[in-house]
Image (cartoon, grey):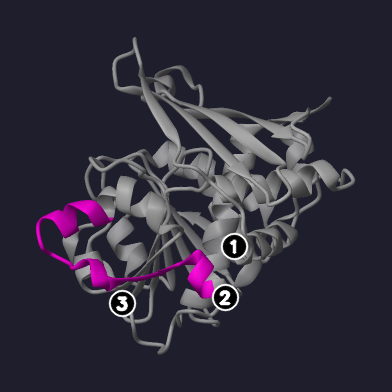
Amino acid sequence: MLVLNAEQVRARAPMAALIGALREAFRGDCVAPVRQLAKVPGGAAERLFLCMPAFASDGGGIVKLVTVFPDNARQAVPTVQAALVVFSASGTPVAVLDGTMVTYLRTGAASALASTYLSREDSSHLVVIGTGGLAPYMALAHATVRPIRRISVCGRSAARAALTAAAVRSLLAPDVEVIAADSAEAAVATADIVCCATRSATPVLAGKWLRAGVLVDLVGSFSPATREADDDVVRGSRIFVDTFAGALTEAGDLLDPLRRGVIARERIEGQLADLVTQRVRGRVSGEEIVTFKSVGSAIEDLAAAQMIVTAPERGLRRQR
């Protein structure tokens, strides 16, 4: 059985190739049952265990097992950790992958794939709100598909923002300016793409901060009780999601406004499968504000795992 750690997973999954793999997966007929969620006892905050399966048309598949322990941050341990098991078409387990790295890479790739349809082609300033392990890979992904020349990292802790900015620099070309921003509001005011990758239960992004033409990328929350963007963001946006099944079950950023009548269901125009197959049209003007909400799909994990298991290992050079 093939066993790959985080560095080996990353070496086998250059971002541009991974984005292409996800594009093909969402064009195909993969099956991803609704993920199972269980509460885990102990800890100072609610702990969760997730089981996420997905299957290709030939019967091959994956299952990702995820723990979400919010109190881990106090011990400098990642909040979200995972292992991913890969099965052949005959049902044989053939590989175990570091699921945390797979999650970082495929989450960034899904947003970057959406960005190719929803952001302006000349987008050059990216704002990342969030300082967790996912944040650097969101920056890498967006910079892979758009000519990003400036990245502003925002967080509640200036020290954490500085560390995250350094991690972003390590993944990108040296000509990309990366700063730890003092103010999220000021950074967002000049942003072309705003990515929120936090575990916040209450909005960290206000619609009044946004300028015309921006893409808002919401990836951090995946619970009906949590939100990263306020009502003005969704009220003033065209809205797309990774999958209807996930977003309309788990995305508090949409479910809360829907429940209160802030937006109607018809405002959610399409999912990734609709964009890649051109069943729906993405951005149509340079002035509209567009929001992409992702809660994660095992289809993305399946596409990433298939590529990782079959790819030759590559060096850990900057992946652009």
Q: Check if residue 274 falls in the magenta segment.
A: yes
Rendering coords of residue 234 (x, y %): 24, 66
Mark 3 against mark 2, which lies toward the viewer?
2
Instruction: Check contact, mark 1 vs mark 2: CB within 8 A.
Output: yes
Query: What residue is at 56 percent from the left and 54 percent from the top?
Result: 108
Location of mark 3 (residue):
211
In depth, the one of 42 and 228 nearer the eye is 42
Secondary structure at badge 2 equals loop
**Residue denoted by label 1:** 26
Q: What element does badge 3 sit on?
A: loop
Q: Which image quarter holds the C terminus?
A: bottom right
The numbered mark, 1 or 3, whose residue comes first in the sequence reads 1
Mark 2 Cα-neighbour bin, 10 Å: few <14, some 14–19, many ≥20: some
User: Is 28 on the left or on the right of 204, as rendered?
Assistant: right
Depth check, mark 1 against mark 3: the one in front is 1
Label 1 sits on a secondary structure element that is helix
* Picture mark count: 3
- Distance of label 1 from label 2 (alpha carbons): 8 Å
Quarter of the image where one finds residue 147:
bottom right
Give the residues drawn in magenta, as a range. Answer: 254-275
- Circle nearer the N terminus (1, 2): 1
Q: Amino acid at mark 2?
A: Thr
Asked whether, in this view, residue 171 is left or right of residue 232, the answer is: right
Residue lying at 26% horizontally and 43% vertically, measured from the top left = 224
Which of the numbered marks, if any, corresponds to residue 277? 2
Please name the amino acid that badge 3 sits on.
Arg
Residue 182 visible to an observer of this rendering: no
Q: What is the x, y in percent for residue 267?
A: 26, 72
Q: In the image, what residue occupies the spot 43% across and 73% down? A: 192
Using residue 51 as the reference point, say whether residue 48 is left or right of it.
Answer: left
Q: Tell me, yes or no, whether the highlighted magenta stretch contains residue 105.
A: no
